[in-house]
Amino acid sequence: MYRMLNYVNRKWNICVFKFHDLATKTNISPLVKFSIWAHDKLVWELPEKYQLIGGVSVQQCRLEQQLDIAKHQANYYFEYATELQEQVWKLQDEVDTLESNESELATA
């Protein structure tokens, strides 16, 4: 049902756009004014809950996009946290080696 509604909506808007294009190409003033009025008043925009993109609702497409962004962010922060943790371990190893060197020098 929604596919048919989207098809009719798309075809209707294409007809209005083509009429406007033809009217502006002819450059007949009353026809151009009427086509502008028609373009402003007769373009039919479906409510978002009925709009489809490739057979999938717009809401679902937005949710999938937000999920992809969230996955990307989670990956980024996981890799960043791993990198920071490795730096902490390296610093801790350096501190441990310095402390062991200092204790060896103190005993000698």
Image: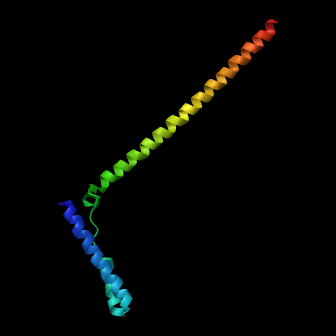
Quarter in which the N terminus is drawn: bottom left
Residue that appears at 36% across and 93% down: 28
Q: Is residue 42 above or below residue 108?
A: below
Residue that appears at 31% across and 80% down: 18
Can the viewer see residue 36 in this picture?
no
Residue 61 locus on image (x, y percent): 33, 53
Task: Please identify the quarter of the rendering in which residue 81 is found.
Answer: top right
Residue 33 locus on image (x, y percent): 35, 88
Can the viewer see residue 73 in this picture?
yes
Q: Is residue 43 above or below residue 99?
A: below
Quarter in which the C terminus is drawn: top right
Residue that appears at 35% across and 52% down: 62
Q: Is residue 99 above or below residue 14?
A: above
Give the residue furthest to the left. 1
Q: How many marks?
A: 0
Task: Please identify the quarter of the rendering in which residue 86 is found.
Answer: top right
Residue 22 locus on image (x, y percent): 34, 86
Give the residue furthest to the right. 108
Task: Please identify the quarter of the rendering in which residue 26 is found.
Answer: bottom left
Q: Is residue 41 above or below residue 30?
A: above
Residue 31 locus on image (x, y percent): 32, 90
Residue that appears at 32% across and 78% down: 17
